[in-house]
Image: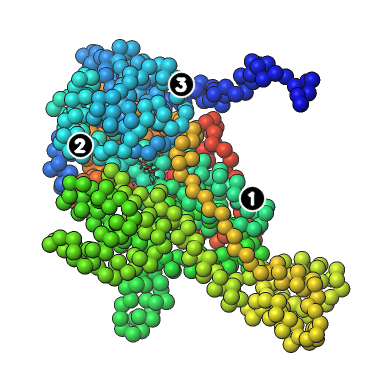
Amino acid sequence: MESKNHKSLEFLLNHPKTSHVTHDVNTETIERRLFSPKKITLFSSRFTSVEDNPEYKFKHDSEASKALPDIIGNHVQKIISGDKKSEKEKLSFLKPRNIGVVFSGGPAPGGHNVIAGIYDEAKKLNPESKVFGFLFGPDGLLESKYVEITKSLVDAYRNIGGFTMIKTGRTKIDSQNKINLALKTCLDLKLDALVVIGGDDSNTNAAFLAQAFKKFNIRVIGVPKTIDGDIQVKTDDNQILCAVSFGFHTAARAFSQNISNLTTDASSDIKYWHICKVMGRVASHLTLECAFQTHANLVLIGEELADYTDHARVKDAQKQGVIDYTAYGITLRHLSRMICNIIVKRAASGKNFGVMIIPEGVLEFINEIQVFIIKLNTIIADYNNKHDKDFHSSFASFNDKLEYLRRLTRGLTDKNKFSIWNLRDDELFNQLPSFFRKGLLVERDTHGNFQFSQVKTENIIMDMVKEYLGILKEQGRYKVGIDKSYYKSVMEDARINSEKFAKAVFKNPDDKFLIVKETIISLKTLKQALVSANLIDSDDNIPSPVIQIFKKSDPNFKTQTHFYGYDGRGSDPTHFDCNYAYNLGMTAFHLIANGATGQMAAIKNLEKKFDKWEPIGIPIAKMMHLEERNGKLELVIEKSIVDLNSNAFRVFKSLREEWLAALSNQDRYRRPGPVRFTGNAEEDRPITLVLNSI
Ligand code: FBP
């Protein structure tokens, strides 16, 4: 029955407070839209020029010289003041321009600010200039689907995450036909320039478009985007030109806030290990950054695992005068053992809980899995090259795919018997859990990359960890350490001689954390120990405080798994990314206005204070190398992975024991706090970036 005071629904819906609090646009959004990112001082001047800097050298690939002859000669270009421009040059600089922009690949926070930077500069220099946004990524370029970017559209998305304004897509422009379609769209729109905002593969596309469009006087500029942080550009003598792509900082901070919340939960309820898989494709840059942001207890860095050597095995083999190749690189089994040992060590110091971070691409660095990924990539690419219908359409179900692999081992497929997959591969593959096999067989992305985000890596590893922990528990080697003062107080409250019992029950009665002897794995074995120490008779019951202590020492390994990826990728940008992306957009515009093409816009000195930031253009063709893709060698931009000699990794390595807190020390969790778009602190930029710049 409705009470008298109950307002009618109509009244409620029409109430100004209701509309205020349920409106789509809240205060945070309004403030974000109004926020003005900082501008590199140079961009406040009316004219800029570019200066070639041939002193920055790259070892470029000879294939790149053949494929990209018109842009391979580009140098690093610095944007400098344009005061010395002649009147004619000034006029040309200010002419109206039509510029197209396209997002390519996964979203990264800050993308809208790149467009805002291009738009603001274009309109400032000549209000007649127009910016067009191609819809749904490269498809919009191929199908001539676009919108004209207006002030109201830009204003609605300033400092807002995602690529929602014009969407994105992963279509690769990888054929002459597609290049021709893109060219036609650009010619029809009378574009002066095209800006490709994308990752390594998309910047590769940008270089091929720049080459093809050169004779039509359409400039193509790339912008380094990806949360993965794997576009980093250094010269031959290790000078950093592009330290990180935009979006990396925000994604890392967004993931870290969640992970940090889990460290708080884990250390409050002390019953779970939280297993956090963090996006980043192959490279572990995001994971390393999250480690610094949160001080999680256990962090796996894929690149380090690949570097693993089992020294004991190497020595054993040496003694026998042989080389044990299996001692180099890590296997899944070995990795799970390593994780178990760490969990056991931490439990011994009373902490049977914690937070672990696993990089999405960790499998790429595990020997046996990498072999499967490469073999399956090759088999799928080979099938696609030979047949009209692609592999995944021809073998739609998992069983069909398995049957095809089986047929390969029997050489029944066709006369070109494929020897890459033999009986042994098939046997080993079929020993993997079916969800994992399904993961390894998922469709490759348009660039031929293995889709790590589709595989439940964390479950694969944790299943093996759980199994081995079970064995360790059975062997009495996995125990929760009991704080000695707690033990004493429980025993003394019950007026039991704590010292006598400690000697019978614990293997280290003098330590701060007491570990129950390995032989005591049940109440039965506990009783046997007490009887043989003459503390009780065989007919007596075990004193209840001793049972209480024993139960606390008995580990129950419970996990919660989490995947941090799409959430952080869609986050609103941090202050750093707001500024960085906006200045990248302005850099792209000024490169165009000064006639550059085939260059990637970048900001040098990102790791330094804002007044040291320098807008530059980096020659994309010189960043390319040959890589196996879809079973063929292709020219692509090299992805950068975590450098084990970098400052960041070395600092991480020396601090991780502290963060593991497996001795009697306290956890050292750090609270990075939420993603903010204001602020000026040193740590408002990636910590790995700051460390690597020292
Ligand atoms: P980009 O390389 O295009 O920036 O995408 C990055 C990424 O978010 C990876 O971290 C992740 O592995 C992948 O995209 C996921 O791809 P999808 O969006 O197709 O699921």
Q: Amino acid at mark 1?
A: Asp
Bin the neighbour count of mark 1 within 10 Å (Cα to Cα): few under 14, some 14-19, many 20 and up.
some
Name the outermost residue toward the front.
1
Q: Earlier in the sequence, mark 2 or mark 1?
A: 2
Q: Are marks 2 and 1 in contact (CB under 8 Å)?
A: no
In the rendered structure, find residue 376 and report the number of the disc placed on it.
Answer: none
Q: Is mark 2 within 8 Å of ligand 1?
A: no
Q: Are marks 3 and 1 in contact (CB under 8 Å)?
A: no
Whether residue 303 is situated above or below residue 431 in the rendered picture: above
Q: Amino acid at mark 3?
A: Ala
Residue 437's image quarter?
Answer: bottom left
Label 3 and label 1: CA atoms lie apart by 37 Å
* Residue 228 on image: x %, y %: 40, 44
Residue 174's image quarter?
Answer: top left
In the rendered structure, find residue 208 and report the number of the disc placed on it.
Answer: 2
Bin the neighbour count of mark 2 within 10 Å (Cα to Cα): few under 14, some 14-19, many 20 and up.
many
Whether residue 111 sits left or right of residue 588 in the image: it is right
Residue situated in front as seen by the camera: 604 or 20: 20
What is the secondary structure assignment of the residue under circle 1?
helix
Whether residue 24 sits left or right of residue 688 in the image: it is right
Residue drawn at point x = 37 percent, y = 76 percent: 314
